[in-house]
Amino acid sequence: MSQDVLKKKPGPLGAWNAIPLWQKIMIGLVLGLIVGLVFGKSAGVIKPIGTAFISGIKMLIVPLVFVSLVTGVTSMRDPAKMGRVGIKTIGLYLLTTAAAITIGLVLGTVMAPGAGVSMEAAKAVAPKAPPSLVSTLVGLIPTNPIAAMSNGNVLQVIVFAILFGLAINMSGKAGEKVRDAFESLAEVIYKLTGIVIWFAPFGVFALMAWTAGTYGLDLLLPLAMVILAVYLGCVLHAFLVYGGALWAAGINPLRFFKGIAEAAAVAFTTTSSSGTLPVTMSCAQKNIGVSQGVSGFVLPLGATINMDGTALYQGVCALFVAQVFGVQLSPGDYVTIILTATLASIGTAGVPGAGLIMLSLVLSSVGLPLEGVAIIAGIDRVLDMARTSLNVIGDGMVATLVAKSEGELDMAVFNSGRDAVGELEA
């Protein structure tokens, strides 16, 4: 009887829970933008709400990556299948990254965002040196897995989780109890994820208000062409590359975008693919219908190495810097930028501030002044919002294509349009 009463008179909380999560997040984002522009820097007083939300999702990153990867690997007991899924995943990530940097270069050439920009912003900076390929490869192996988890070194956690999952499969009967324990632990972690995600609209509101209040229009307008080029590029890449690939695979792109919208909105405000991972996994499994095994393997990997949005940003910014400093780039320079940005997307994976580090590497590869990084740094947060959203959408797209190719995409879930936290709210 009490349940019937609740259905007839849901109350404010019930009415709020009835709204799909992606709509609640968009409401929080728009209201936060308005509050930030109206109240300016004083809107930063509510930033602790957003900080608390970020802390909540950061709390989930390491256990979620580790547990989901272990269960993802153990669900692929056939080594051939795991190798096949791995090759498809990395191949798709590299192809979409190359396409993204190409779109960025085209937009940078056509829109010429560097024309008329004052050189007063170009003050000398000492950009952080990008890690070498050798040090990156050697650093993949953790000398202390517990320390890697404690320090949040996601790449090392990924490597240890994959090896641990393989060891469970190779242990035969002795590893079955461990496998069952991890599957149960994964369900608990996913439920905890749902609890944290419920607070996403409030965290997004606070973060957006702080961002808009801190940066305002004074900083954004002088470099509006750079911002417009990056945002336009992200939209084009999402609909042309991702949408085209999904359509070619017989998957409705619009349904996919609706299913991944919650993760994209969270990524827009948190500017962290790894931080958005709990939401991305929830969307992939409950909205899109990607199997737990595929999503548990593909998405943590993508959150670390897939940087389509960052690569596109490199193309726009490289042309911007060249135009500001009056440097003419040759066709060979364009090819160098594409190759460097594509490979650097893996080489700088997991490094804080990877966008600016990658930009320094790309500029160095074609002899462009590194002082250009200082100009971009002022609006990097605003650009980071768009490119992180694209990164997350790309992660979901690759997981969807891989799941479809492996027969592990539940089309009934995909077509139902469920809310990622529907189970929690029910």
Image: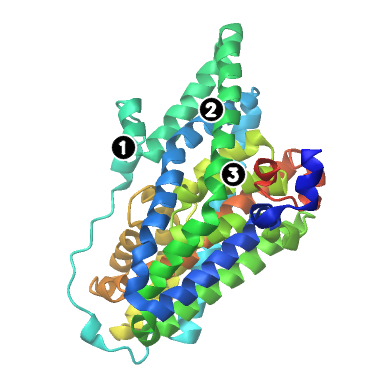
* Residue beneath the point at 54% across and 36% down: 192
Q: Residue furthest bottom?
A: 116
Q: Name the residue type under label 3.
A: Met
Foreground: disc 2 or disc 3: 3
| Residue 281 marker | 3
Q: Which residue is mark 2?
A: 70
Discs 2, 1 touching: Cβ within 8 Å: no
- The residue wearing badge 1 is 151
Quadrant in the rendering for residue 84: top right
Quadrant location of the C terminus?
top right
Q: CA distance from mark 1 to mark 3?
A: 22 Å
Q: Which class describes the residues within 10 Å of circle 1: few (<14), some (14-19), or many (20+)?
A: few
Give left or right: position of 405 versus 316. right
Q: Nearer the viewer, mark 2 or mark 1?
A: 1
Q: Amino acid at mark 1?
A: Asn
Instruction: Report the amino acid beneath label 2.
Output: Val
* Quadrant occupied by the N terminus: top right
**Mark 2–mark 3 distance (CA, rounded to whole Å):** 15 Å
Disc on the earlier residue, 2 or 1: 2
Of mark 1 and mark 3, the one earlier in the sequence is: 1
How is the rendered protein coloured?
Answer: rainbow
For the point 33% across and 46% down, the residue is 133
